[in-house]
Amino acid sequence: MVKREHLSLEMECLTLFQSNPYLFETIQGLEKRLGRRMSDLEPILEGLTAQGILQKTGEGALAYFRYKEPAVIAEFSFTSELEPL
Amino acid sequence: MIRSFDLIEELQEMYASHYSLTNFITDESGNIIMPAKGNNALFNLLLVRGAVKEIIETVTKEFELSKPFFIDILPGVYACIAPVEGHPGTLLWSGVKIEQSSRDMVKNKIDHLIDGVEVDRLLSQTSTLTLESKKEWLLSVKKAANMISQLKGGGVSLFSEHLKVLQEAFKAEEGNVSRFLYSFLEKNSRIDFLGICEPRLDDFYEVSHAAGEDAEQIQGASFSPGEGFLGRVLLTGEQAFWEGIEKDPKYTFFQKYHFYPKSLFCFPIQLRDGTLSLFFGGSRSSEVNTDTVKDSIKNMAMLMEVILSAESLQKENSGHLSRQSALADISMMLVSAPDLKKISYILVDISMSLVKGPFSAVMLKNPQKQNMMLVSRGNIKGERGSYLKRAAKDYFTATSDLPPDRLVPSMKKLEGSPAIIECPLHFRGEILGLICAGTNGHPNQETEELLPFLHTLSLIAGVSLQLAGEGQENVMERKIEILHSSIKEFDAETNRIAEESFKIAREFTGKLALSEPLIKNILIACKVHCFSHEYLAEKFPEAEFPQIVKDGTGILAEGSAFKNEEPGIGSQIFALAVSYARNEGDMEAIIVRPYMKKIRQEFLSYLEDSQVVEQELTLEPESSHAMGSKSVESTIKNHMNLSSREKEVLDLVIQGLNNKEIAQELYISEHTVKNHLTKIFQKLNVPDRTQAISKVYQLTYNGSANP
Amino acid sequence: MKVSTGIRGLDKVLDGGIPQGSAVVLEGAPGTGKTTLGMQFLYKGIVDHNEPGIFFTFEEFPDQIYEDMKSYGWDLKDLERKNMLRVIGISPDILLEQMVANDGLFEQLVREIDGKRIVIDSISLFEYLSNEAGEKGRSILYTVRNIVRKFGLTSLFIQEDDNLDKSKIPFEHFIADGVIRLSLKEHMNIYRKRTLEVTKMRGTKIKEGEHIYQITDSGIYLLLASQIVTDKYISDNNEKIKTGIPKLDSLLGGGMAKGAVYMLDTNSKANYRHIVGAIYAERVKAGNRILSLLSSTQTITELKALMDLYGINIDQLAKEKRFYFIEHYNRPFPAGWEGSVFQVQDMKNEEYDLFLREKCTSLIKDNHEDWFAYYDLSTIFNERGAEYVLRSFAKETAFARSVGMTVLVLCNFKEVGVQAASFLERTSNGVFKTWVDGSYQYMQVTKSPDGQISKPYLLESIDQKPYIRLV
Ligand SMILES: Nc1ncnc2c1ncn2[C@@H]1O[C@H](COP(=O)(O)OP(=O)(O)O)[C@@H](O)[C@H]1O
Ligand SMILES: [Mg+2]
């Protein structure tokens, strides 16, 4: 079940990384920039990483996160033959 | 936001040089926000000497302006001030002119006030304020203020304001609709009441919400479909704007409740269950709904639709996710997302992080082509890819409108693999896109609970997509219209070329197999041909027409060589059209360039063909028309028992002008035109316009009013 | 090899630019324009020299920077899309760690876009990485400098000015290859003056001094301290004359009013020759006939040279009776000019008065063309006395107006005294002042017929006609 607090912080992180695709930041750095607690941020960032929305590099305190763009097919024809992608 | 200061400045300059008046703009605290432009020496002097400061203060503080008006800076020395619509307190000042009878007095006064000025010369350079020039001046200032208003607001920012309201509203527990109405009112000074009508069980409708001063009078008022203005919209199902409504018999509905609007609008809003509600509003002070007001009303209506839908959803699902503040954050994100791609990123990420399944895909339909943009996370290869194709085809190629139950998110159960959530994105029943989010297993309570949340999300996403798609177009088109109308105002010859080249290009391109976007770019290029391509490229960095203007102007400029590449076909057509218009349709004079042989030939033969047709059509009536209109004129002038104003109006009716055009031509309101027409019809004893025209012709050619 | 800074003036100060591969500290107080200058360095590098760049920002989010830089018309997102630029939001500790790491993020970024220039905004934050700032900060910066050198990057390290102890030279200055300093000062109690100074730059000569810069709509614009108005005798006779002084024209709402009398108030240091030259040239080009009162310092030869500079053949004009001179000093003039020079050295004041009223009036009235007069009032003060000027100047200006002749009067208000100056100022329709302050010359319109007054502008000397420009 999605929790209220959790969800809105999750959305906040999402927006931040979406509008700053070249942001490379640690949990600590984000704590400073967003003014949020590290302990709240950590599960969210890990979750987003698990879903492939963020990319985590490194380990420990120096591990940093960045946004991973979704795959885009600009002109995808759906009327053509139904061969698998 | 549009960076429009330079456009405003340009407008100011053009206005200033055209009318030899100095103009500037003040804000609601009386600060000059756009500095004075123009060479009106007397006004400039008065400005510099601080003689206008106090007046600015007074006007800003104490006047509540809704119309342009004159003010005397000194006795006998006038400036004209117009409010910039949509920006309360913002004023356009233009000045000065002197009353003939006051010249001597003014001379003394200035002599007295200011040393070292050559008063005579100064005064002789200042034009005289006459009764005729007064009207023209008012009108010109009003027009300029209108253009500035469009440049400043662009409607877009107003819209994002509204969306902020939307965000707020989702946070609130109760009373969304009323909050909305009030917040709309606050942001639109030209509208002073708003309301909603909803159906009752007995087939009657009643005003369920009303906002604005005295609007409580009509709260709870009920009516049947067809009754009064509002009831009419229930029948026609179409939005309507009314102006100057006091004389209309339908007005009694409002009178009954002691409520007296002067202008009114009403939008039907269809809810998910198919029922109709009404969104209405208007002004008790202003008779007209200007274009700017109409734009913002349309946006409001769109949002109101979303609000009402979301509200009814929330009622059904109270206690669920959809009420959470996260939704407000998401709507804000969508609002500030500038383009379709960004919106789809947001949607794919949100759906992914909500559902937490193996994949999520957002597909946006491309209305022009039979394809779409696909943005995805997770693995969409193999079976899933085929599924996505099928789903897209299913939703996007439906020939008729999808039934309402297909427009809500649903759980798709697939053989042998986990369920997938399908969430269509739509606006007013039109499918714009589709979110498909894979789940981890069979439908269970947890995933089911996501559906209402996604539904509300899809409503907001729908309207955001609609606006992002439209928005970019709109901003550009509006800017182009403003550029174009500034030419129209200030440079007749250039305007003629713009219009004629536009017209011929439109007709000619219609005959060629060109893509829609290319045609559009050619036509825009014609409209703004007189601006330098550097300027256009700066103002419209994303657009393609600046290139057309660039190459086209190159083609037109003799001797400019295109060494490696030929200029595009668009530029060639542009050059032909402009050259045609410049030479006033002289076919011989149309430019010749070695690389343009083919298209030029096509253009010429098109012109020949169309000329033949035109000639065929005009051959006979031409001579009689010339004669005819003369004698029609004299018929009106001599034979009819009409006032001189009525004669003028009738004359314009015969010339084929509609009411609005007549109003513009005669500098009177449309409402007055209608009054004149009513009288004319009475006097001619005819029921309508067509009969009136035919009567005049009968009188002219048969000398008789009887058929 | 020099790397252009993207600011023309600064390139001149640096004799071409920053030596390639240098690490330069850019310091200044908040709001002085460091971020702007840093981004301009990258932006111009990309746009003008095809050199990709990376901007590291520790405090600001990249999207804030995209937004801020739009005010200069720089579309950074577009450059990012083209893989020419990266604006990286990162913490100082991560950057440092990724710089030293083998194939770390830093190296990847540089490789990915083939970066040539970088900016770090700001290195002040490195100091906070450790509690005992001093030594640790120094060694960090040292490391960073070595790494960017290794990659051959030309870099700007932005340093926030903390306004602390100014007597000690900060360690950054020792480590860096160069130091550029921005400051903001009060100037004449009215305008804030922004100045740029290069205090160090290895491997290039620098123009010393505090150079004024402005933040304009298209970024930073630097004006060299030595760039004040200097005489230029470049003669290009064949070229056509274009305009007077465009900016001055626009300050005057299009130009001088016809038939108006303008005062050009100069102080002794100010060079007004090009102002006068430009106006002469413009008047001639517009087809005016000219009446010129020669001063003791302005000989015909000198005037001829000046006009040559503007491509005007004064000899020809004199012979054609389009250029007339009033001469107080009985100096020789070229042959063929006889009818064009009025020798007034022997005239008493009354006679001179009469000469103006009769001779000049008929001359002007007989030629139904527009006239322009240049009147060196200092000469009249010297030759005919202050009393004469005060008595007759109003009459003379009235006469000029009555025949529609535009007049430029040259005068030094300081020299003639407050009373005379205020009389002259009142009597003229317009006043331009030009003066020298420090190493700059200024110009200002303090009065004009339509009441417009300008702020002081810097007078910059330029290479083409009209050789001066107001900035
Ligand atoms: N288009 C512009 N014209 C003039 N000044 C500007 C413009 N845009 C921004 N500025 C000003 O430039 C200054 C420089 O800002 P910035 O480069 O961020 O300085 P710093 O990084 O040194 O703090 C700011 O004070 C801002 O107000
Ligand atoms: Mg900064």
Image: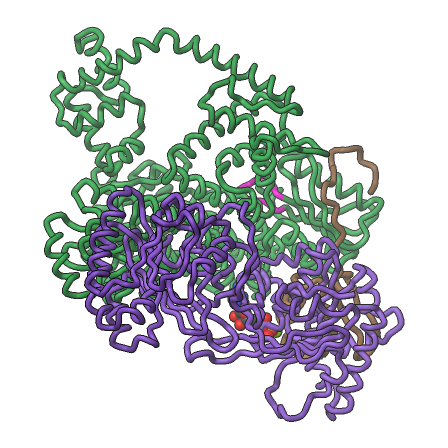
Between residues C437 and B671, which one lies in front from this camera angle?
C437
Q: Residue B567: where, in percent of width, then height?
A: 65, 32
Q: From which residue to which does the magenta span run?
A: B425-432
Colour of chain C as rendered: purple
Does C348 appear in magenta?
no
Task: For residue B5, say whether it is visible.
Answer: no
Q: Residue furthest right?
A: C102
Query: Against B169, is A38 above or below?
Result: below
Residue shown at 37%/34% (left/top)?
B492
Query: Against B60, is B696 above or below?
Result: above
Which image quarter: residue C157? bottom right
Colour of chain A as rendered: brown
Location of ligand 1 given as a quarter of the image: bottom right
Q: Residue B496: where, in percent of width, then height?
A: 41, 30
Q: Residue C256: where, in percent of width, then height?
A: 34, 55
Does B429 appear in magenta?
yes
Is A14 situated left or right of B493 in this image? right
Residue shown at 26%/25% (left/top)?
B652
Determine the main secondary structure of the stretch shown in magenta.
Answer: strand
Q: Residue B233: where, in percent of width, then height?
A: 37, 38
* Label total for image: 0
Between residues B370 and B304, which one lies in front from this camera angle?
B370
Q: Which chain is green?
A: B
